Image (cartoon, grey):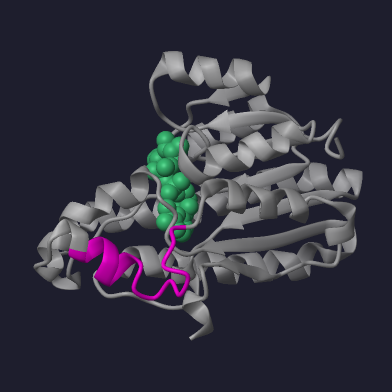
Amino acid sequence: MFLEGKRALVTGSTSGIGLAIARELAAEGAQVTLNGFGDEGEIAKLCEELGATHSGADLTDVAQVEAMMADAGEIDILVNNAGVQHVSPVEDFPVDKWNLIIALNLTAAFHTTRLAVPGMKAKGWGRIINTASAHSKVASPFKSAYNASKHGIAGFTKTIALELAEHGITANCISPGYVWTPLIEGQIPDTMKARGLTRDEVINDVLLVKQATKKFVQPEEVGAIAAFLCRDEAQNVNGANWSIDGGWTAE
Ligand code: NAD
C-alpha cells in the first residue's frame, strides 16, 4: 500500500470517475476526503467503505471551497475531478449554464490548487491530477462551455506543472473519452434534441463513433492511471495530458 500516510482530496467523488479514483487511492492506503452531492445515506456508506470523510461543498462557491480545504488539512494528493456538462447550440446556450461549467470545471481547480500548494511545497511532495477530457484536445459541436473549460484546465495544468516542478510536485491531466457515468446518461436527451437523433443513434453514431475501440472507458481504468501518477516512479510524468479514449484523439 504505497499511499499509506498520504492524504488525498478527490472532488466530485460521490459518483462516476471521481468515486473510482477515490476507491483506487483508498485501496493503496490513502486517507481520502470525498466531495460531491448525493443521497446522505449512500455517502455515509461510501465513507465507511473507504474509511473516508466527506465534504458536501459546492465548488462553484469560493467560500465553500475555502472551508473544505481548511477542514481537509494538508493534502498530499489533489484530484480536481468535479465537472458538469450541457449540450446546446451556442446561440441558445443558457448563460447560467456557461457560468456554472466554467466555475466548476475550471475555476474550482484554481482555488483548490492555490490552497493546496503551500502544504505540498512545505513537504516537498505533491500530486495534482486533473480530470480533463478528450475535449481538452479536440472539440465536438454543441459543447462550447465544456470544451472551453477542458481546454482551459489543460493549459492550467501545464502552467502549474512548470511552476511546481522543482518542489517534488507533479501536475497532470487524465483525458478520458466517453466513460459510462451519470454525466453521459444526462446529456443523451439534449444531444438527441440538438442533432435530431434517436437514443441508439446518439450512443453509436455520436458517442462511440470516434472511440476506435467502440467501447466505453470504465471508471476503474481512469482510477488506475490516477494511482500510477501518485507513484514515485511517476515523478517525471509532469505536465502530461494522458489520453484514455480508445484512440479517439489519435486520429
Ligand atoms: P458524474 O456526474 O458521475 O460525477 C460528477 C461528480 O461531481 C459528482 O460527484 C457530483 O456530485 C459532483 N458535483 C457536481 N456539481 C458539483 C458542485 N457544484 N460542487 C461539487 N461537486 C459537484 O460525472 P463523471 O462522468 O464521473 O465526470 C467526472 C469528471 O470526468 C468531470 O470533470 C467530467 O467532465 C470528466 N469526464 C467525464 C467523461 C465521461 O464520459 N463521463 C469523459 C471525459 C471527462
Q: Quadrant of residue 139?
A: bottom left
Q: Above or below — where is 19 with respect to 42?
A: below
> In the drawing, does residue 44 fall left or right of residue 157?
left
Q: Above or below — where is 86 with respect to 18?
A: below
Q: Is residue 211 magenta?
A: yes
> In the drawing, does residue 212 fall left or right of residue 198?
right
Report x, y in % for residue 186: 26, 47
Report x, y in % for residue 169: 82, 56
Report x, y in % for residue 80: 58, 49
Q: Is residue 10 magenta?
A: no
Q: Which residues are magenta?
A: 201-216
- Kindly tell me whether residue 182 is visible in this rendering: yes
Name the residue at 10% across, 61% down.
Answer: 193
- Kindly tell me whether residue 52 is visible in this rendering: no
Report x, y in % for residue 121: 85, 49
Name the residue at 79% across, 31% down.
Answer: 29
